[in-house]
Image (tube, rainbow, N blue to C red):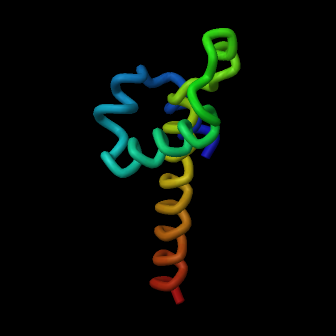
Amino acid sequence: MDEFSELLKKAPSDILWNELATSQQRQLATSLWEATNYGGKPKPGQFKDVEPKRQYLEWVLRMEHDKQWRNSQKKRYTADN
């Protein structure tokens, strides 16, 4: 998981948004970002407190990666037994 997180950190934002993420993942990341950062529109002085949307996309991609990894391990364990 650490290697995947490092890969996400190093990848350019346009690659994350346009190549790696599905439309559902982009929508989830955007929704989470909006829910966290908007309690109404932030005032100009508060923009420094708004977290980058990229962090939310990285989080969504890590969660999906973790889910896929656990599923593949389950299948492997089931096939071995």
- Count how many numbered circles sit on residues in the image: 0
- Foreground of the two, 80 or 18: 18
Residue at 52%, 62% (x, y): give it: 67
> Going by the image, does 35 lie left or right of 26?
right
Residue at 63%, 23% (x, y): give it: 50
Percent across and percent down for residue 57 are 49, 38
Percent across and percent down for residue 45 are 68, 10
- Foreground of the two, 75 or 19: 19
> Going by the image, does 7 lie left or right of 36?
left
Residue at 61%, 22% (x, y): give it: 42
> Going by the image, does 79 lie left or right of 17?
right
Against 21, residue 9 (above or below) is above
- Foreground of the two, 64 or 24: 24
Residue farthest toward the top in the current orientation of the protein: 45
Against 44, residue 64 (above or below) is below
Percent across and percent down for residue 52 are 57, 24
Residue at 63%, 25% (x, y): give it: 51
Percent across and percent down for residue 72 are 47, 68
